[in-house]
Image: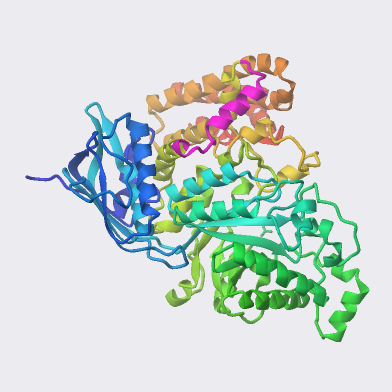
């Protein structure tokens, strides 16, 4: 049989992207595998589909297969003639054969590679460990396709392995507590895009989130009752382990720990009493590093936590110590003088060094934010960078192993493109290939000032799927359009894992409109984004734990979807011959929709005062869309624009850039581009 073989080398990724963009929704592979060859074969998925397992995987593979089967039947409506797969299921004649050499260990540098071959009759998934097999199952779920004849897998041969062994998501469960179901559904999302580290930021000024038996006032007084019991922690660890994901606990020291001092003020560098911090920012309360009682406390505390958390690595924080409490404490100043400790930086080094010794005793290695870096390296410590690329280079030169978070702060509300274009190892770094091996990978960080269980998924997903591709795939996989096209499919598939990024947005729109028609608000939200960085702090409101996170900016996403499509249209038009009437038609219909949207939204605002804060921004959308329509008309008819009108329009566009309700209108820039094109002709 002659097969038509289409080889998708990395060079062709952008071509496949163009085909996918906006139209075809199938075979959205993300993260994109190391090697993919598609064939013209089709493996038809029908009720006879079943799975057999060979070799010696860890038992976690069996329920993973069952979860995959649930997802297949959920998508297809097929009634499979097969029972749940179990260790006792005989391996005979199943169309999907999984072969695994040995049980995988959920540890750093475990083999996660796999090979997936799909022919017309059979699917073969082979892996050294079941962790690789789990990744292969996720890839198989992404290959499922359909047409009028039914469901099928495209014939292909995929050979895959990660670029980096450390691929993480950090969840700050302290500033806003995240209940168990939020953690679990996000672990499923992580597994779907082959992330393998869940870093839990478990203590902060605003909350201490783990039951501690040795020092129960930590969780009793430091958490408002919002903490994980030890049974729940074990449940999270087991849930993650079943999906090949390590859990790294972080207890952030010596700063960011006001919540510890509510129950144990004697740990602090200034006398109490302390209360749980309710606001956002960087605060002064800091552990006293000069007292032996501090280390006795931390020894007993980490002894208990080292038994609870099973991973070899512990994160000790170490970031953003203001040093203020130390400066204001005469006995700490005396300690520095007596021990020839030059400054607060050196005192923090002393503290980190003492804490490291405790971890060595309990057979743990430590990770810390870049501030834990010292002049000379401490063996085994992993540095997590978050501010400057330079730190990454320095840390590697000093012999540290590094994980990178700079450029992956998803709480800052930058676009998926922004993070996707940020390489884990920037090109201009002066490192040898051998040195680069000490960059273990990266983590995306979900700091939780402005998220709640209701909207956190919409901050993590789908952008983290694009970032996961940056962590897993070659940096040559870098076509932004392809990324966005595939991301749309992946985002929709995430809903079958219970992730709420899409459905909660609709629910929030209903609440914002007071259960009236959401159409106009949805149109508006599709062209706005929340303020980026931490600008939200500065805009007139003092945010706190109990502030509302239910406003328009809380439902808006970092990638205003309609604005992005419109911007792409304008970009394409501006590099074209500028005569394409179909493109002009498309732009015109968007602009027409936005121009008339305000009249409808005003009616909604009248019954829903929570929307008042975006009323003038919505009016500006109408105004700038009218300017865009005039520009499109001028381009179409080659009409010369009136000079006075251009001046007034430019001023209006400028005004429309001002934030309202901590939201920004994302269509102003492309409309300015259109105006510039119209003026140039
Ligand atoms: C950090 O963002 N303070 C690590």
Observer-nearest residue: 229 or 405?
A: 229
Q: Residue at x 43, y 22 (%)?
A: 585
State which region is magenta. Answer: 495-516
Q: Position of residue 665 (x, y in %)?
A: 62, 33
Q: Residue at x 91, y 68 (%)?
A: 328
Q: Position of residue 195 (x, y in %)?
A: 47, 54
> Is 280 covered by the magenta stretch?
no
- Residue extending farthest to the front is 88
Q: Residue at x 31, y 62 (%)?
A: 56
User: Is 440 rendered above or below residue 11?
Assistant: below
Residue 489: quarter of image: top left
Q: Is residue 352 left or right of residue 292?
A: left
Observer-nearest residue: 640 or 321?
A: 321
Observer-nearest residue: 11 or 296?
A: 296
In this picture the colour scheme is rainbow
> Is 511 covered by the magenta stretch?
yes
Q: Residue at x 63, y 47 (%)?
A: 411
- Residue extending farthest to the left is 1
Residue 321: quarter of image: bottom right
Q: Position of residue 357 (x, y in %)?
A: 66, 78
Residue 444: quarter of image: bottom right
User: Is 667 rendered above or below residue 474?
Assistant: above
């Amino acid at each position: 049989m002659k097969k038509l073989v289409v080889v998708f080398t990395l060079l062709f990724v952008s071509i496949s992207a163009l085909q996918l963009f906006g139209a075809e929704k199938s075979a959205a592979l993300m993260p994109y595998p190391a090697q993919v060859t598609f064939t013209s074969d089709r493996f038809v998925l029908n009720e006879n589909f079943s799975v057999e397992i060979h070799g010696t995987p860890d038992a976690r593979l069996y329920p993973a297969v069952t979860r995959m089967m649930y997802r297949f039947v959920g998508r297809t409506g097929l009634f499979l003639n097969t029972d749940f797969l179990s260790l006792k299921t005989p391996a005979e004649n199943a169309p999907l054969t999984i072969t695994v050499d040995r049980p995988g260990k959920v540890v750093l540098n475990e083999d996660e590679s796999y090979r997936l071959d799909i022919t017309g009759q059979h699917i073969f998934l082979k892996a050294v460990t079941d962790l690789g097999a789990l990744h292969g199952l996720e890839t198989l779920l992404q290959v499922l396709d359909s047409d009028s004849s039914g469901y099928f897998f495209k014939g292909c041969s995929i050979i895959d392995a990660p670029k980096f062994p450390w691929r993480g998501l950090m969840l700050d469960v302290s500033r806003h507590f995240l209940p168990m179901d939020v953690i679990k559904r996000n672990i499923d999302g992580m597994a779907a895009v082959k992330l393998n580290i869940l870093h839990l930021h478990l203590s902060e000024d605003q909350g201490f989130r783990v039951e501690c038996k040795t020092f129960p006032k930590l969780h009793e007084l430091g958490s408002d009752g919002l903490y994980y019991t030890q049974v729940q922690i074990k449940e999270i660890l087991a849930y993650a382990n079943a999906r090949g994901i390590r859990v790294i606990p972080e207890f952030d020291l010596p700063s960011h720990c006001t919540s510890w001092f509510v129950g144990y003020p004697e740990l602090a560098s200034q006398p109490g009493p302390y209360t749980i911090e309710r606001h956002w920012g960087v605060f002064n309360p800091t552990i006293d590093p000069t007292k032996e009682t501090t280390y006795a406390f931390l020894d007993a505390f980490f002894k208990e936590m080292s038994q609870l958390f099973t991973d070899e690595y512990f994160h000790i924080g170490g970031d953003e110590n203001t040093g203020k409490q130390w400066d204001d404490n005469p006995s700490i100043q005396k300690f520095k003088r007596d021990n020839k400790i030059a400054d607060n930086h050196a005192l923090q080094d002393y503290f980190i060094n003492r804490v490291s010794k405790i971890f060595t005793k309990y057979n743990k290695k430590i990770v810390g934010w870049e501030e834990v870096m010292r002049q000379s390296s401490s063996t085994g410590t992993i540095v997590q960078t978050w501010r400057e690329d330079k730190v990454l280079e320095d840390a590697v030169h000093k012999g540290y192993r590094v994980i990178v978070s700079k450029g992956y702060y998803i709480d800052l509300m930058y676009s998926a493109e922004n993070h996707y274009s940020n390489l884990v190892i920037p090109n201009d770094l002066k490192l040898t290939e051998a040195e680069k091996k000490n960059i273990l990978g990266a983590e995306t960080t979900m700091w939780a000032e402005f998220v709640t269980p209701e909207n956190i998924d919409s901050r993590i997903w789908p952008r983290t799927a694009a970032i996961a591709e940056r962590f897993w795939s070659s940096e040559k996989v870098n076509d932004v359009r392809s990324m966005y096209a595939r991301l749309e499919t992946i985002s929709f598939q995430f809903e079958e894992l219970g992730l709420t990024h899409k459905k909660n947005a609709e629910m929030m729109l209903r609440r914002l409109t007071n259960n009236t028609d959401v159409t106009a608000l949805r149109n508006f939200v599709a062209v706005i984004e929340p303020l980026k960085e931490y600008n939200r702090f500065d805009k007139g409101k003092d945010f706190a734990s109990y502030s509302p996170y239910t406003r328009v900016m809380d439902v808006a996403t970092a990638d205003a979807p309609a604005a992005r499509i419109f911007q792409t249209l304008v970009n394409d038009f501006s590099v074209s011959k500028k005569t394409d009437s179909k493109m002009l038609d498309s732009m015109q219909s968007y602009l027409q929709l936005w121009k008339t949207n305000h009249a409808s939204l005003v009616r909604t605002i009248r019954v829903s005062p929570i929307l008042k804060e975006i009323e003038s921004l919505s009016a500006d959308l109408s105004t700038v869309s009218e300017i865009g329509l005039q520009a499109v008309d001028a381009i179409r008819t080659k009409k010369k624009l009136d000079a006075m009108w251009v001046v007034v329009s430019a001023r209006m566009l400028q005004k429309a850039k001002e934030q309202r309700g901590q939201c920004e209108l994302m269509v102003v820039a492309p409309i300015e581009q259109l105006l510039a094109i119209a003026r140039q002709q």
